[in-house]
Amino acid sequence: MAGEDQTSGEYIQHHITNLTYGQLPDGSWALAHTPEEIKSMGFLAIHVDTMLWSLMTGFAFLAIFIIAARNVTAAVPGTLQNLCEMVVEFVEDNIRQVFGTRPNPIIGPLSLTILVWVFLMNLMDLIPIDFVPWVAHAAGINYFKIVATTDPNATLGMALGVFALVLYYNIKIKGPIKFGAGLFTHPIPHWSMYWFNIILETVDMIAKPLSHGLRLFGNMYAGEMIFILIALLPFYAQWALSLPWAIFHILIISLQAFVFMILTIVYLTQAHETGEH
Amino acid sequence: MTINLTMLGQLISFVMFVLFCMKFVWPPLTQAMRERQKALAEGLEKAVLAEKQLESANDAAAVELEAAKKQAAELIAQARQRANQIVEDAKGQATEEADRIKLGAQSEIDQEVNRARESLRARVGELAIQGAERILESSVDQARHQEMLNKLAAQL
């Protein structure tokens, strides 16, 4: 809800600004206090809140699954192991359907990490929008976004990681020469069209991580924005909109985590395909 | 939305989490799942086997039961036969015993009859002599008539 001394615009602006640490124009390193300061920091700055919450959710994921893996038994599983195995089995099923049964040491753990981690980061969206920032404000922190996936840096960072793997497997499976040649001969295998093919393939290459990362960001950002707009209503009326939207959002956060994982699997599958298609 | 170092930070933590997951999470969980799948498959196989064994055991039990029944019937028949024989034997012995007792009684009766006859004979001789004495009113020579009287008595 908008504070007494804030306009709606300021309230929204406040909620979509990350807590940024970087170099101020006067040369000192500090947390930014205004959007102008953030802008002046440029690339050499870091979103403390995004990093904090993504690391916390990531460690939560690891903690849950490592506890389950430590106490793992092939006999009757406990509740936690059961839950974790359900997730692992779901991931394995999807890999089997898209990627097939090719042996690959990384696609399983990669997909599992993405699914659960992105889900947990998205899950922060369901915490009432003003709750954590209000606590942070009381502690003297200006900006505090808790949903890491509403920060394009987070989603693009992960997409870049996946993209690096895609390049790695493209070169490993097809060989550097065949992969390089493929950029020129695909989709139109005629020498006069090589210039056209390389442009097309380059755009395709760049579009992959961009669309991968921005799809997740866009969906989560839009969802977050709706919550912010709902929070502008009088407090007694907010539940009428925020409750249905939150319930609907449970579907969205799961779906987006799933989509991010499936796209990863699809990209890696394409990287492994050597035959003509 | 500004792009800055956060992207690299996120990339690094992403790589780190994936590596951790690869090393500590994925292998034990998937291995346990494989093992359980194997154990389940084995268990199901064993269940089928056990069912077959149960079936054959049931068949064997039925055969045994049949044999036992037959044997029991034989035993009962034997026992009945033996019981009949014992009864027959007892009957025979009883008849023999009865005959013997009857025989004893008969001989006793005969002896008793003879004895009675003897005493009767003696009495008849006396009575005859008395009668004769009375008739003759005279003394009769005992010695002379004794022989005649004995002859008379022997005729009785």
Image (spheres, coloured by chain):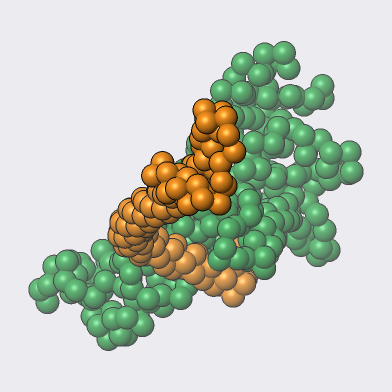
Chain colours: A green, B orange
The percent position of residue A41, horizontal first and vertical second, equals 70, 58
**Horizontal placement of A183 versus A191: left or right?**
right
**Towards the viewer: A41 or A91:** A91
**Horizontal placement of B118 versus A43: left or right?**
left
Q: Quadrant of the C terminus of chain B?
A: top left
Residue A135 appears in view: yes
The percent position of residue B142, horizontal first and vertical second, equals 57, 47
Image quadrant in which you'd find residue A126? top right
**Towards the viewer: A88 or A238:** A88
Q: How many marks?
A: 0
Q: Residue at x 75, y 24 (%)?
A: A2
Q: Residue at x 67, y 68 (%)?
A: A70
For this orientation, the residue located farthest to the right is: A139
**Horizontal placement of A39 versus A31: left or right?**
left
Position of residue A277 relative to residue B152, above or below, is below
The percent position of residue A110, horizontal first and vertical second, equals 50, 66
Position of residue A188 relative to residue A2, above or below, is below
Image quadrant in which you'd find residue A13? top right
Q: Residue at x 70, y 45 (%)?
A: A146
Image quadrant in which you'd find residue A229? top right
The percent position of residue A239, horizontal first and vertical second, equals 66, 19
Position of residue A173 relative to residue A26, above or below, is below
**Towards the viewer: A184 or A124:** A124
Residue A267 appears in view: no
**Towards the viewer: B113 or A127:** B113
Q: Residue at x 67, y 13 (%)?
A: A237
